[in-house]
Every structure is written in C-alpha cells, then in structure tokens.
Image: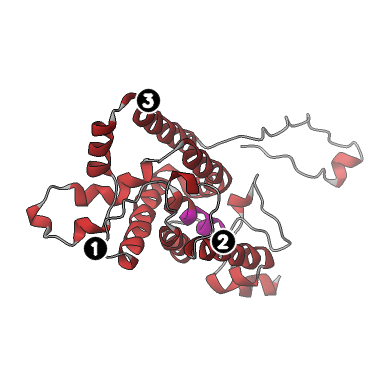
Amino acid sequence: MDHQREPTDDVREGRDTPPPLPPQPFFNLPGALTVTIALLAGIYFIDALLLDREARSMLLFYFAFTPLRYVYSLADQGLEWIWTPVTYSLLHGGIEHLLFNCLWLLAFGAPVVRRIGTFRYILFWILSAAAAAFFHAFLNWGDQTILIGASGVVSALMGAACRFAFPSRGGFNRIDGHLQPRQTILRSFRNRTVAVFTALWFFGNLMIAVGLPLIGAGAGEIAWDAHIGGFLFGFLLFGFFDPLPRYDEDAARAH
C-alpha cells in the first residue's frame, strides 16, 4: 500500500514531480479484519433473528465459556471444553455489545493485522481468547457465569498495539504505525502516550469491577477480568507473534 509522504527537496524545486497520490480512505481495512467483523455480525443476527429461546440456550451451552465446566471431570462430559475457550469470543449478547467491540476492533485490530498477517492474526485471536477466558475462570473458579463476546481479544489487540503503534512523539499512528519497530516492555512505559492510555484503561476496568455501570452494561455484567487477561496476553507476549524486529536502543544511540 502506497502512503503519502512529505515532498523531498527535489520535488519542491520542481526537478522531479511525481503524479499526486490518491488520498487514503479512512476505512482501509485488512481483508482478515473485514471477514472477522462480517462473521461476528452474521453470527449475532442469526442468533437474534432466527433462533428461538431453546435454540439460543443450546447455542450458549455448546459455544459459550463457563468456569463451571472445568470443575467436573472432562472425561465425563462432551468435548465442548476444548473449543468453548475460543468460540465464546464470536458470540454477543446485544447489538450494543457487538457494535462496541467492532468499533474497538477497527481501531486496534487494523494495525496489528497489517503487521503480523492473517495466519498470525488467527493464531493470536485463538490464544488471546483462551487466555482471557482462563484468566476469568481463575478468578471465578467453579462459577456458573457465562462468558461471551470479543472484548478479551480486543483487549489483547490493544495491548499488542501498545508495543509498536504509538510513536514516541505521541498520538496513535493509524496509517503506517504497523511499520514502526516493536518497543520492549520497559521502553513502552517510557512512552507517555502508552503509559497514560494503559493507566486509563486499567482504571476503567477497575471501575467496572467495583460496579460502575459503563457502556455495554445493558447486555449483562461486563467481564472486566477477561479484559485484563486479554490485555496482559497481548502486551506481554506480542513479541512471539511479531515478524518485525524490536527497537534496538544501542543502535539508536549510535545514530
């Protein structure tokens, strides 16, 4: 994908004038992200418009995540315990829940997908969904709570983006942030934008934990612990998915 750049001195002086580049569209999404949003929306509308109450109950039983499932012997139950730590992330409890997750997915999923590619993105989704689910289960062991929604994965994408998409000068680079070198964990916190964003993000989830109603609460209780589990997965483990090198501080000093 071509990007608009500042003109060089040669261009300013008229010695070499290339044709103007077309403006970048605001929504220039990777194909994998477009398919993801279409899949989430399709599953939601099938659930909301076509399924009766009994069918919805079966959908939740076979594809939603619950910590209660892991209290009992796995050998004495079906195989749902294998896939539900991932498939719950494809279900949503209401249109507000779906739209809220899709908006954040647009913002933070795009730079991550552009950077790591489709295969790594799918693997990242699977593992971050499981990490968020089991972090929730760890704090709610044996509970009958039912966990659905892509919020844990979205939180993991936020954590991953904090490692590369926030320039040191501040802001969030939507266009070519995926080309920037990966920051180390410690160096990320030296970036004021990352530090402030992370602090506000954790503060917001702490408010949810103590019962402050926020956007999306109408669809049910918000699983703040799954958010935290996902964010920690994305932030701490992004280097295992990243095909680009990390920031080399010694080399930067040498230059």
Q: Earlier in the sequence, mark 1 or mark 2?
A: 1
The answer to which of 5 and 159 lies nearer the viewer is: 159
Q: Earlier in the sequence, mark 3 or mark 1?
A: 3
* Residue corresponding to mark 3: 49
User: Which residue lies at the image location 64% right of the left edge and 47% below the top edge?
Assistant: 176
The kind of residue on which mark 2 rests is: Gly
User: Which residue lies at the image location 54% right of the left edge and 59% below the top edge?
Assistant: 212
Magenta region, residue range: 155-162
Does residue 102 show up magenta in the picture? no
The answer to which of 24 and 58 lies nearer the viewer is: 58
The kind of residue on which mark 1 rests is: Gly
Decide if residue 254 is on the left or right side of residue 46: right
Q: Residue furthest top?
A: 50
State the mark number for residue 182. none
* Residue corresponding to mark 1: 142
Q: Position of residue 183 (x, y in %)?
A: 57, 65
The answer to which of 222 and 107 lies nearer the viewer is: 222
Q: Earlier in the sequence, mark 3 or mark 2?
A: 3
* Residue corresponding to mark 2: 204
Quarter that holds the N terminus = top right
Q: Is residue 224 above or below residue 53?
A: below
